[in-house]
Image: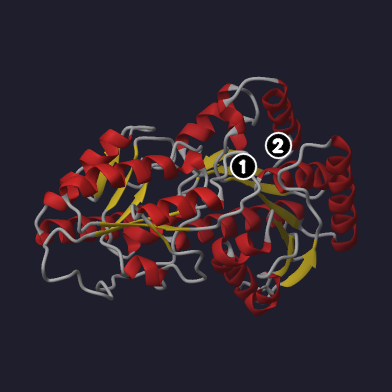
């Protein structure tokens, strides 16, 4: 029986950081896993997961039809050569062009819609084109996973996916062994009980609420000058919503925030934080950074927004704030500062319990294993 699985994403970084648990589980179950993504500094780590890496050039942010047709051809050549039993697609271009190529070759497809980004919130030709591409690509999929109910409902209402194959899973899940409670590595200064450390971990995009976070920091520090506000994540992102390095440097020089660069192990920065903030109005799936923060028993402040609100029970393991409102965000940060250390610790404990109940990575992995086994059993029914 063919037990080869091809998994395709828009970056090897994405595979290493978000799909390593699934890859290891598939390999442990006896599947041959082929990982397909554009090469980057993380590609060399893929073989250590037990899979075989195949590089694929991809213009992630471009919309040039010629380059996209070339991507469809490249995907088709890889899939025709590999002939997997199942194709797993993540992120928009692998989902669209990988699914189209797999459909032409009769290869079953499982898609994962991990958030919709900025296109679905806009009108115009590009938005209509993307939706039509999804409608065509997903029509023959065996299963389409969504990370939140809002995205699932939207795709069904707009007839982008047949309702019978749409199913919600708990985001990407979180590794509860890797991400577990840790004391703050560097204690707060003894001179102030309000010297809390707030961190935003994300790609530096305006739509992730970076500007609102900085403005809220200005407001809060007028009353609590010992509070610290930090940014961690990629600069120089190829995205129309990218925050420039010059802008971040200006904030740092002003003294309102600290920029920590990037990290291959965010547990260090999470351990040093008192609260994780993500004031996003981007169409998230379920933000992985919030799951990791909750798993490490850190209170969360995030927006009452698609994907983000899935992780927070308001007032229990954190606070929800209004999207695009630095004033409301500042109020929620101030509320957390005013809590006793015991109350903040209880918020963190409730966050850990929530991810144990709802977002354990093993729940996601088991869903994938069941779907793949079901596809194989239908392809090779026992006599």
- The residue carrying mark 1 is 144
Q: Which mark is residue 265?
A: none
Look at 70% across and 37% down and name the residue there.
138
Left or right for 289, reference 255: right
3D distance between C-alphas at marks 2 and 1: 8 Å
Image spot of residue 23 (x, y percent): 62, 67
- The residue carrying mark 2 is 138
Between 265 and 231, the one lying in front of the other is: 231
Left or right for 185, reference 115: left
Look at 87% across and 51% down and name the residue there.
76
Q: Which of the 4 image quarters holds residue 3?
A: bottom right
Image spot of residue 153 (x, y percent): 51, 29
Q: Which of the 4 image quarters holds residue 330?
A: top left
Q: Earlier in the sequence, mark 2 or mark 1?
A: 2
- Decide: marks 2, 1 in contact (CB < 8 A)? yes
Q: Which of the 4 image quarters holds residue 188?
A: bottom left
Give the SS element for disc 1.
Answer: strand
Image spot of residue 27 (x, y percent): 64, 73
């Amino acid at each position: 029986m063919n037990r080869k699985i091809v998994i395709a994403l828009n970056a090897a970084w994405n595979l290493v950081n978000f799909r390593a648990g699934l890859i290891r589980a598939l390999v442990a179950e006896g599947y041959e896993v082929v990982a397909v993504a554009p090469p980057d500094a993380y590609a060399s780590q893929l073989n250590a997961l037990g899979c075989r890496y195949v590089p694929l050039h991809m213009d992630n942010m471009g919309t040039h039809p010629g380059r996209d047709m070339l991507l469809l051809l490249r995907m088709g050549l890889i899939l025709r050569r590999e002939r997997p039993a199942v194709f797993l697609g993540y992120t928009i271009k692998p989902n669209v062009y990988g699914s189209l190529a797999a459909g032409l070759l009769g290869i079953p497809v499982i898609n994962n819609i991990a958030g919709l980004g900025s296109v679905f919130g806009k009108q115009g030709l590009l938005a209509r084109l993307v939706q039509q591409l999804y409608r065509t690509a997903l029509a023959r999929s065996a299963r389409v996973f969504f990370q939140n109910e809002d995205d699932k409902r939207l795709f069904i209402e707009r007839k982008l996916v047949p309702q019978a194959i749409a199913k919600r899973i708990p985001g990407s899940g979180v590794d509860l062994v890797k991400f577990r409670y840790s004391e703050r590595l560097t204690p707060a200064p003894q001179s102030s009980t309000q010297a809390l450390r707030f961190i935003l971990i994300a790609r530096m995009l305006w739509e992730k609420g970076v500007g609102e976070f900085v403005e809220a920091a200005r407001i809060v520090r007028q009353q609590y000058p010992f509070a610290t506000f930090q940014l961690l994540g990629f600069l120089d992102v190829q995205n129309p919503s990218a925050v420039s390095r010059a802008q971040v440097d200006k904030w740092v020089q002003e003294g309102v925030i600290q920029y920590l660069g990037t990290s291959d192990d965010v547990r260090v920065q999470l351990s040093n934080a008192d609260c994780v903030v993500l004031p996003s109005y981007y169409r998230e799936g379920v933000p992985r950074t919030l799951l990791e923060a909750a798993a490490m028993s850190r209170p969360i402040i995030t927006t009452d927004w698609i994907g983000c609100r899935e992780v927070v029970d308001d007032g229990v393991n954190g606070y929800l704030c209004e999207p695009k409102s630095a004033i409301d965000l500042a109020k929620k940060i101030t509320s957390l500062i005013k809590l006793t250390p015991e109350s903040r610790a209880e918020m963190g404990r409730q966050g850990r319990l929530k991810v144990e109940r709802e977002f354990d990575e093993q729940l996601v992995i088991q869903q994938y294993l069941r779907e793949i086994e079901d596809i194989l059993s239908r392809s090779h029914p026992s006599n």
